[in-house]
Image (tube, rainbow, N blue to C red):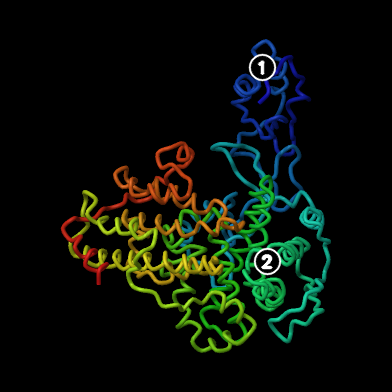
Amino acid sequence: MPSATSQPSHDALLHYLPGYHVLICKECRYAIQPSAISRHLKDLHHIYRSDRQELLEYTKGLDLAEPGDVLLPPPDTTPVPLLPTESGLACAKEGCSHLCVTVKRMKNHWATAHRDIAESGRAQWRPVTLQTFFRGNQLRYFVVSEPATPETQSTQISETHSEPDIRTLETTEPSVCSESCTSKSELAFPSDWSAEEIALFNHFRTSTYHGLGRASMSRNIWEISVPAMAFHHDFLKHGILACSALHLAYLHPTERRRYQMKAACHQARALPLFRLAVAAPTEENCDAILAFSHLLIVHCFASEEQDEDLMLVKSGTTGTCGTESGLPDWLQIIRGSCTMFKHVWSNMRNGIMQPLIEETLNEEPLPIIPQNTVHSARLRELLVLPLFGKNPPIVEILEQQMTAYSSALIILSRAFVRAQAAKERGIFTMWTAVQIWPASIPMEYLEMLRAREPAALVLLAHYCVLLEPLEESWYMVGFRKRLLERIYWQLDEDWRKWLDWPFAEAGLDPLGAAMEDVRCDPMEASPSSYSASTSIIVTQRATQ
């Protein structure tokens, strides 16, 4: 706060709201507790005793309420003057009035207050605009109406990208995907779409889709076919809007938090509907399910709120983005696609999504243990990893863990070769990256990762090396480094030396300044270690 060089009048610094019995500091933009007025003027505004007297005399004549006695405005009233508004979330559980400003806090609320149990097909929260009179331990949010109209917000999005706010979209490029997509097709928006939703949808079709397809045919799918399907499947509609909002968050750093909040809200609306659809795929919804699965992966990479999940596993109990198996939804789809889509697979292979499916398939046979690759020596060093550590786990579960670790290591070795082949052919995509390792590793390894077993964490860090070619995509910018840094802070000091190579490949210094601003989650369980006594299992498995 700027210091006061002369005694300010109470009108210049303070404003009394008689309807709420609170005193607002105009510079700080929040209400001052009655007992803290003198300290506030002194400590924050450097107004000394002789100059504070007039202000204190003024406040003595006001009818000020204690923070707990202030009556909050009814929901959705006009914002209170002088107080800032914040994008926030309201719990959607009937009878619950919980409000907060971050997705992480809302997830924690659901985990503790509602045990993560949401009604099928319903979102767990909704976006709202919030204000609060007081800060600190007296903070109490209340819901107010939007400070700007939806038309104004839509104009802000569309003007930034030179896109008009219209109720119809007209395509000028022919679609090669379906007879229903003609060379001149018009998409009419239903009347219940808000102007903001239309603006986000327009942005997806004119900008975001470019980064989702490698070839022109698959890009046409994202530009034309997928948006057309969204009018018949609400989960895909909200998945598109969430992806568009994340793209805008990347494009506009100053508005990043606002767009991330919009993305989180649309994703929260999409996921319950998606889970209902994926439980019973049909010829009518299977293409939309596949498209949304791709968008789920983009959301995993681009949304920092999911960093704590370590990409492949949930960090705690089942939440808004995970399934009962403890896996993220996108990984559940990939790993179970053969069973999930067995009744509709032929329709998918020969339908609208055929170019996208062909782009993601890689059936080239590879040796179990690749030889003569630049990374073989590095990965071979990981064979001795189970020799490391001081606190062996329970003997009964050790062999199962070792088998899972060795299997995941073998698959990672193969993944490096497959990735190199894909890069040389120019077909290494986001989908390739998740198919060559996460889709194949044993469930027991994922359980080790969820338990934050150090050897499993080190293996995940080495997988991050493969993600380097994807960093030119907007949704991958910073993801690899954030994931490596989180792994670093969940390992004991003795284990961190195993991260030297992945960190060097990502341009990070494990012991340098890059780590200073990263904080480990104190709620994370301490990682356990492995016994040297059964390390022979890894060596035997790796050479089979």
Q: Is residue 305 above or below residue 276?
A: above
How many circles with numbers are drawn on the protein?
2
Residue corresponding to mark 1: 47
Pinpoint residue 421: horizontal percent, then vertical percent.
47, 68
Q: Amino acid at mark 1?
A: Ile
| Residue 280 numbered tag | none
Residue 358, compared with residue 4, is above or below; it is: below
Quarter of the image with the C terminus in it: bottom left
- Where's residue 104, x and y in %? 52, 53
Residue 244 figure quarter: bottom right
Residue 332 falls left or right of residue 99: left
Name the secondary structure under disc 1.
loop
At 18% from the left and 55% from the top, the residue drawn is: 532
Which residue is the extreme one toward the top? 50
Residues 139 and 337: in front is 337
Q: Circle 2 — which element?
A: helix
Mark 1: give few (<14), some (14-19) or many (20+) Cα within 10 Å. Answer: many
- Mark whose residue sits in front, 1 or 2: 2
Say which residue appears at 53% left-offset and 83% top-offset.
280
* Residue at image mark 2: 209
Mark closer to the chain start, 1 or 2: 1
Side of 232 where 417 appears, left or right: left
Which quadrant of the rendered structure holds the N terminus? top right
- At which x and y percent is residue 384? 25, 56
Name the side, left or right, on which 171 lies relative to 527.
right
Which residue is nearer to you in this view: 307 or 137? Answer: 307
Rendered view: 304 above or below 345: above
Three-letter amino acid code at disc 2?
A: Tyr
Q: CA distance from mark 1 to mark 2?
A: 55 Å
Q: Residue at x 46, y 44 (%)?
A: 508
